[in-house]
Image (cartoon, rainbow, N blue to C red):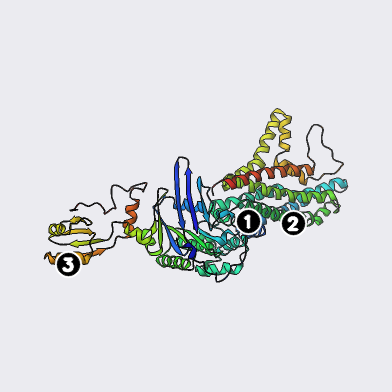
Amino acid sequence: MIEVRGLSKHYGATAAVDDITFDVRPGRVTGFLGPNGAGKSTTMRLIVGLDAASAGTATVNGRPYAEHRAPLREVGVLLDAKAVHTGRSATNHLRALAATHGIRRSRVDEVIALTGLETVASKRVGGFSLGMGQRLGIAAALLGDPATLILDEPVNGLDPEGVIWVRTLARHLAAEGRTVFLSSHLMSEMAQTADHIIVLGRGRVIADAPVGDILAMSTGTIVRVRTPDADRLAGLLAGPDVVVTRTDADRLDVTGRTAPQIGELAAGAAVVLHELTPASGSLEDAYLALTADEVQYHAGGTTGSPASPEGTPS
Amino acid sequence: MSTASTAIPARAASPGGSAVSFGGILRSEAIKLFSLRSTIWCLAIIFVVPIGLAFLLAGTVGDTVGIPQDAQQSIWVQSATLGIGFSQLVVAVLGVLVITGEYSTGMIRSTLVAVPRRIPALLAKALVIGAVTFLVALASILAAAFLPLGLLASSGVQPDLGDPAAWWAFLGGAGYLALLSTLALAIGTIVRNSAGGIAAVLGLLLVLPTVLQILVAITGAEWARNVGTFLPDSAGGRMFAYVTEAQAAPAGVLVLEPWQGLLVLSAWVTALLLLAALLLKRRDA
């Protein structure tokens, strides 16, 4: 359980994290989503006390991280795959961390096996690929068998197999009742891993809700319709809770009606349909919609939001 | 809001250990120190070079048959402690790297996540590097004192091996290097950068005394000479000087007793470590 209250971090005049409040609860995977530079890493560093907060508090299992008697047994942290001396072997790195808490040597071997590092464990970390570095970072996070895991961009640099491994591991750890808090700027990754999502944009929490709600927060469920008689169908569909967007001469995006409803309506009015596709708003869409105003540097004038109706709203 | 009902199941296998302990942190720092090749190389150089230099000096003493016992003692102690002037440079580099190596690689974040109170980690580093340097330096100095005895004897130097003043010098030499390693660690912690840290320590050891000497040579300023006496290398150098009661300081020049040299160097180390601890505690990592 992580509790963040009014947390802020200022660097001079700029606020990297600006008065954020949220809880990360046990037994589920909580995704921490936001564009690069949104303040995700800073927030995680504040939680484990690597950076001092300008204002507010962050507690883990009821206490500030530094006040725990056995911090590594409470919280496992992957902040940065490169938080390792490049001249040391993976085993010695983990042994050194384990020694601080009197964690037994066999646990070091366990986490090495768990993360699939056996063959490279005695090699110097300087020669590791990014993926192996990530695995070592995750091994270090698991060392104390902690009830809470904070993983910053754990799938960064991993191959597809590694990505699935992290996803499975995160779900498994949450299923064991642990608190799993992982950040990513990849929304698609979150859709498949997280139960709950906190979206951060420019240092502020802009959404804190279950994955399903975040998806629904996009433009709702869109149905793509292709018909040579687009004008007529648009007129038929018009209603107080329906939004029809004309995307092309023969294409309509409809929200507020399901595909069967549209199909039946079209059949009743003898409108020919060439296509009728329910397209669930992706998390990607939701994320872009949520952060559209929050991204600090826009890439040109593109708008990712499909929410602007130009058709015939009644 | 269903947190209360979400029980955390019993853990399958306890990883052992209950809490952060200072003993554990010491063990951790020892593992870190000995698991780097650079450390091993530095320690090997600190051990080997003084022995080599002692042999070199013993072999070039020349015929000294008939010189007073006092002078024989002095030659013996000097040959054993000659290498310290070189070892101090390696010790300085090692002491700085112990901490700046963590900053340059990012390891410091792992260290501070494991020991979030931070100060115990710095203290453990100081104790480990100090103790290891002391033991290696003492072994080296003793080897440098005793291995070339045969060579010295052939030049007519037959020292009194039980001379307490000699033994104090040997211990003092090892103690000087040990304190220097912690001084370098403190400066490395303050500077957080390998090149900068090494430059700062070597500046303090080599450049500053030279500047003061030039100042003394040009102006003859008494104060500059006396300031120089309190710099780490001069004060520390007194710790392994061969001092007998027969020797007396020239009038007007401040000369520290070995124990005073120890006090002065300890004050340097304490002050710099305090500053390092303060900064480590306050700065974002």
Q: CA distance from mark 1 to mark 3?
A: 78 Å
- Label 3 Cα crowd, 10 Å radius (few <14 / some 14-19 / many 20+): few
Question: Is B62 located above or below residue B247 in the figure?
Answer: below
* Residue behind mark 3: A264
Instruction: Give the farthest residue toward the bottom.
Output: B12
Q: Is residue B106 left or right of residue A293?
A: right
- The residue positioned 37% from the left and 46% from the top of the image is A296
Chain name for mark 3: A
Q: Is residue B91 left or right of residue A135?
A: right
Residue at the spot of label 2: B139
Q: Amino acid at mark 3?
A: Glu
Instruction: Work out how far the residue at label 3 is from the one at label 2, CA to CA, in angstroms.
Output: 94 Å
User: Residue B40, position in %: x, y?
Assistant: 64, 58
Give the amino acid type for the residue marked by disc 2 in the picture.
Answer: Ala
Q: Chain of mark 1?
A: B
Of residues A96 and A170, the one nearer the viewer is A170
Q: Position of residue A12 (x, y in %)?
A: 47, 40
Amino acid of disc 1: Thr
Mark 3 vs mark 2: give the one in front.
Answer: 3
Mark 3 and mark 2 on one chain = no
Indicate the position of residue A46 as horizontal and vertical percent values.
51, 51
Q: Are marks 1 and 3 on the same chain?
A: no
The tally of labels here is 3
- Inter-mark Cα distance, 1 to 2: 17 Å
Residue on which disc 1 sits? B39
| Residue B208 percent location from the top left of the image | 66, 38
Which comes before the other along the chain, label 1 or label 2? 1
Secondary structure found at label 2: helix
